[in-house]
Each structure stands twice: as C-alpha cells, then as structure tokens.
Amino acid sequence: MTPRWWPAPAKLNLFLHVTGRRADGYHDLQTVFQLLEYGDQLAFEVTADPAIERVEGPASIPPDQDLCVRAARLLQQAASVRQGARIRLRKVIPAGGGLGGGSSDAATVLQVLNRLWNVGLPVQELAALGLQLGADVPVFVHGSSAWAEGRGERLQPLALPECWYLVIDPGVVVSTAAIFQAPELTRNSPLITIRAVSPAETRNDCEPVVRMRYPEVDAALDWLARFAPARLTGTGACVFAGFERAIDAERVAAQVPDIWRSFVARGVAVSPLQQALSSQG
C-alpha cells in the first residue's frame, strides 16, 4: 500500500526583534512568520504495539533525538494513547538553517497522529504541547502565516502580499542557543505595532551577531543584496530575498554560486498541511 505523505512546510522570519530577556532564560520577541510552499514530508503507519519508531529519516539525527519521535511520544503520553506509530521522514529543509524544519516536522506529527489515533485534541491544546518541544512549533500547528510575540507562541494570523522567495543555504549550521547567549546581541529593541512591519521599520537583531561569527552567512547576505534586500531568517544560517514574480526569483537563483544550495518558494497564507488535512475531511 502506498503511504500518504503529509507536508511539513518551511518558514521564514521576515524580521526578528529581540525585545527583552525573560526570567525563564528565554527571550521576548516580535516577528512575522511567513510559511512557504516548500518543505519536508512525513508518512505514518499506525500500529497496535505502542512503540514509536522512525523507520526513515536523516542519519545525522538519532531517532530518539528527532523532534518527530519526541512529538509522537508526547502526544501519546498526554492523551493516554495505546497505539504506536512507524514514522517516515523525508528531509529537504536544511538543519540549523532558521527555516523551522524540526519544529514543522513535530507539528505535522502532532496534527496527523491526533487524527490517525482518533485523539481529537483541539488546536490550542496541540499548540501547547508543541510549545514544550520548541518555540516555533505552535505557528506550524495553527497553520497560518502570522504576527508573533512572546517566545513566538502568541500568534495573530496575518495576510501578507503574495511573494516569491529565493532562499540560500550557505552550508553552515548556526546554534540558536549560542546566538541568543551572545553578549553582543541586542536585547532591548522597542516594541512595534502590527502596522509597522515594513522592511524600513524592521530588521533581524540576530543578523549582526551571525555575520560576525559565520563568514559564510556574511558572504551570502552580501551576494544576495546585490539583487534585492536580503535578510537572515531566524538565527540563520539561511538568508532570503522576496520578489513579486517567480520568474524574477528564478532568474537570480540561476546565478547563485555553486558553493551554496538554494531554492525558490511561494509564500502562503495557509499551511499546505492545513489544506491537506481539510481535503481529508
């Protein structure tokens, strides 16, 4: 039987302001999450045995450390599920790139197994579970491009102009924890309103730190800025630029140096996963 593959889309942070340090060690942020029509794929086989297994996935991530497995076990425990699952994961989102790959994978696991196991938890409860796994998981559970505050879990769906994004992966892995612990990181950006999200009024506070510590990212940003305003997503390492037309993004993509990977993807208001779930009734 051919497995059903479910999407786990990538995201971009169109900007990222660090507005303060919290007592729990995390930081308060303001950002806009832009979901992309590009991402990983997962397939599931429900089993009578309660074991959770990842039977296909990246060799670089041990199964027990994979957010997919952790998400399945978390849902299983929270809902007292007696069934198990065999999980297949096909990765295309680069690890450590600031595109939310692991978080999106976890969100897809939570939502699809919530249905396949007949758990029936509402979205808010799934998002709360997801927050235990990572600050970016809730936006993928809710499934809309969004304005975000707090750790990134306070979300407001946002209608964004249609845009095509060229994303460049400089080929390095950036440690999010190390960037947020960096003494030189700006942590007191003034709060802005949802109306002030134009590029002229926003930035990525992590970008100067990442540029200084990762010359590959610095070089990719400088190269892309020759064609369009370029920005880091999250803590990187991926960088991006937006274009009104796919053909313009593809034209620049064709010139990306061979030392870097790149892709072009359309920004979407609603996650491809939500569309897939809705089509299944």
Image (cartoon, rainbow, N blue to C red):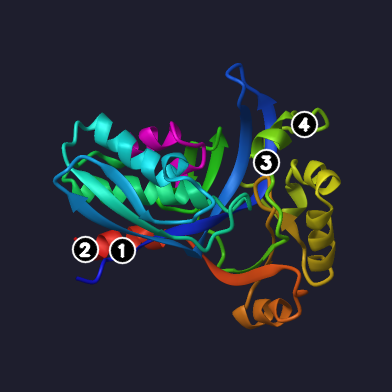
CB atoms of marks 3 and 2 within 8 Å = no
For the residues labelled 4 and 3, the Cα–Cα distance comes to: 11 Å
* Spatial CA span between label 4 and label 1: 40 Å
Measured as percent of width and height from the top left, residue 208 is found at 82, 44
Determine the CA span between mark 3 and mark 1. 32 Å
Mark 2: which secondary structure? loop
Given this view, does label 4 or label 3 mark the residue nearer the observer? 3
Q: Position of residue 46 (x, y in %)?
A: 20, 52
Compared with residue 216, is residue 135 higher up or lower down, i.e. above or below?
above
Amino acid type at circle 1 is: Ala
Camera-side mark, 3 or 2: 3
For disc 2, the marked residue is 280
Circle 4 or circle 2, nearest the eye: 4
Left or right, residue 129 beside residue 66: left
Give the residues drawn in magenta, as a range. 124-139
In the shown orientation, is residue 28 left or right of residue 269? right
State the image coordinates of residue 117 (x, y, percent, origin top left). Answer: 18, 46
Residue at 64% from the left image edge and 74% from the top image edge: 244
Q: Earlier in the sequence, mark 3 or mark 1?
A: 3
- Asked if marks 3 and 1 touch (Cβ < 8 Å), the reply is no
The numbered mark, 4 or 1, whose residue comes first in the sequence reads 4
Label annotation for residue 276? 1
Which residue is identified by label 4?
Answer: 182
- Checking the image for residue 107, the label placed there is none
Per the image, is 73 magenta? no
Q: Nearer the viewer, residue 152 or 87?
A: 87
Residues at circles 1 and 2 in contact by the CB criterion of under 8 Å: yes
Above/below status of 262 relative to 52: below
